[in-house]
Amino acid sequence: MRHSEGRFGRTEESLFGSNRGKECPTGQHRDFSRVLSCFLVSAIPSSGASFVTARILNGNLIREEIYVELRGEIGALKAAGITPGLAAVLVGDNAASKVYVNSKVAACESLGIRSFFLTPSATITTQELLMLVHDLNERDDVDGILVQLPLPPQVDAKQILDAVDLSKDVDGFNPINVGRLVAGRPNLVACTPLGVMEILRRSKIPIEGAEAAVIGRSDIVGKPMALLLLHANATVTICHSKTRDLPATARRADIVVAAMGRPAMITADYIRPGATVIDVGTNRITDASQAERIFAKFPERLAKFREKGSALVGDVHPDVVEIAGALTPSPGGVGPLTIAMLMSNTVKAARMRHSGRAAGAATVRR
Ligand code: GUN
């Protein structure tokens, strides 16, 4: 398969860059991208045929770049007597939420951000959780508040998100902060869409003038994602379950952001050759016949599935690597950036809340 020349003059030659013709670390494939490291080789199908594969946008590498910057900013804040603090609230014992919140707390520790981990019981009422949030709003050592979603059904999540102080809303979920983003005067912005913008910008993917399709319209990802792309001068289409001819609509786009939470739904027929594909989904699959269909060209991933009885897969079908110009893997693409941007928002919140003392501290605009 050859990529046709895209709207931005992206040709097969430019995809290969200076690595054209080199061997990959396993000796099985040509090495198309400098960022393609051994652990990502499983993103390439093992068909044996000669084909073009997408440039892999490695979220772990971009996260490390951001962490280097953040360590500098946190050091400067500490020198001014300010230690950023994040309060993470995990209600109940949802296993997936526990993993996410543990990763967020671990990231705080690795960067020197103070963390406060609160774990109220699954039976907490809306009023009790509101009181907890109000306490955190009042505390001077807490710069950021994160209430992990989903909340148990007896809790009114909207009331809780509304109660988080705007200056500590590091998730960017308070509707006033969402409204500020709509108005083009953002305060704190949702972490996953911010992370996607970091991936695009640091990977030098052209956004201005590009056609972008955001698939999924959630408050957490789809809507703020569309707004960030719009403010960066992309022409944005928001697609959802009622969109007529979704594949044809997505195929017009130079940038496709898949955020529907449906395993491997975005197949190659949704993607214009050479397009940039951002996979926001992380779905655990346990069905063997589904895994066989999804990983048909990825024997290593299928073998791992058989070993463990489950596997993580994005919203984008792995075969899309054969048609996209650039692609975030899942896992290992957007996920690491979500946590990195939570750390970045916490540092930003600390700087804003202590703006007098933090005046001289280094700032990286994200
Ligand atoms: N649940 C799934 N994603 C998120 C997130 O980004 N923040 C919070 N608070 N909960 C989530």
Image (cartoon, helix red, strand yellow):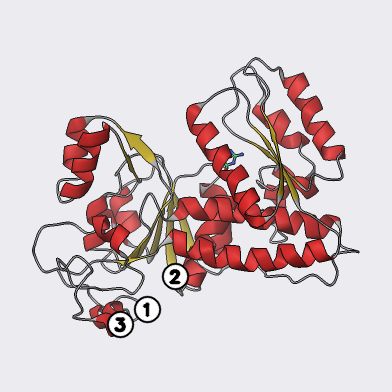
Question: Which residue is denoted by mark 3 in the rendering?
Answer: 17
- Image quadrant occupied by the C terminus: bottom right
Q: Is mark 1 within 8 Å of ligand 1?
A: no
x 83%, y 57%: residue = 82
Is 85 located above or below residue 54 in the figure? above
Q: Residue 332, how many percent across, how many down?
A: 40, 53
Q: Quadrant of the N terminus?
A: bottom left
Residue shown at 76% from the left, 38% from the top: 164
Looking at the rendering, which quadrant does residue 159 occupy?
Answer: top right
Residue marked by disc 2? 210
Q: Which residue is mark 1?
A: 8
Q: Is residue 176 visible?
A: yes
Report helix, strand or loop for mark 3: helix
Tell me if label 2 and label 1 are in contact, CB under 8 Å.
Answer: yes
- Kind of residue indicated by mark 1: Phe
Kind of residue at badge 2? Ala
